[in-house]
Amino acid sequence: MRKTIDISRIHKEFQTMKQVTTILGELLKIFPRYEFEKLEKQHQSNHYTKYCTGWQQLITLFDAQIGGHDSLRGIQTSLGVHAQKWYHLADLQT
């Protein structure tokens, strides 16, 4: 006797897979980027910046806090390791 596989059931299981939200993602939901950048523009806080915007600094500080980094070298190493995954958050250059 031949066993049949129900492809539609398997297809539904793949469609219902949930996307995992990281702690960093949850924190960034609290601070919408467009509102943050609106405040930056209102207070001209990026006027004298050369390398990183306020948004990039916020992401870096969140990552450092979550990762428990206690030095700049630890933060730099962490950002360097995960640089390919951060393209959608900011153009962080390490």
Image (tube, helix red, strand yellow):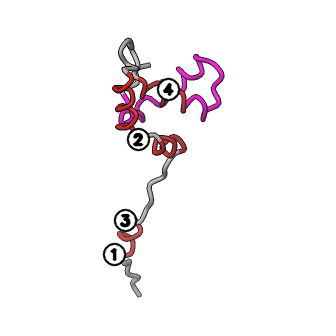
Q: Position of residue 52 (x, y in %)?
A: 41, 19
Q: Nearer the viewer, mark 1 or mark 4?
A: 4
Mark 2, secondary structure of its residue:
loop
Mark 3, secondary structure of its residue:
helix
* CB atoms of marks 2 and 4 within 8 Å: no
C-alpha separation, residue under disc 3 versus residue under disc 1: 10 Å
- Name the residue carrying label 3: 15
Considering depth in this image, is 3 or 13 the residue closer to the camera?
A: 13
Magenta span includes 56: no
Task: Name the residue type under label 2.
Answer: Pro
C-alpha separation, residue under disc 3 versus residue under disc 4: 32 Å
**Of pointers 3 and 4, the one earlier in the residue sequence:** 3
What residue span does the magenta drawing correspond to? Answer: 63-90
* CB atoms of marks 1 and 2 within 8 Å: no
85 in relation to 73, above or below: below
- Name the residue carrying label 4: 79
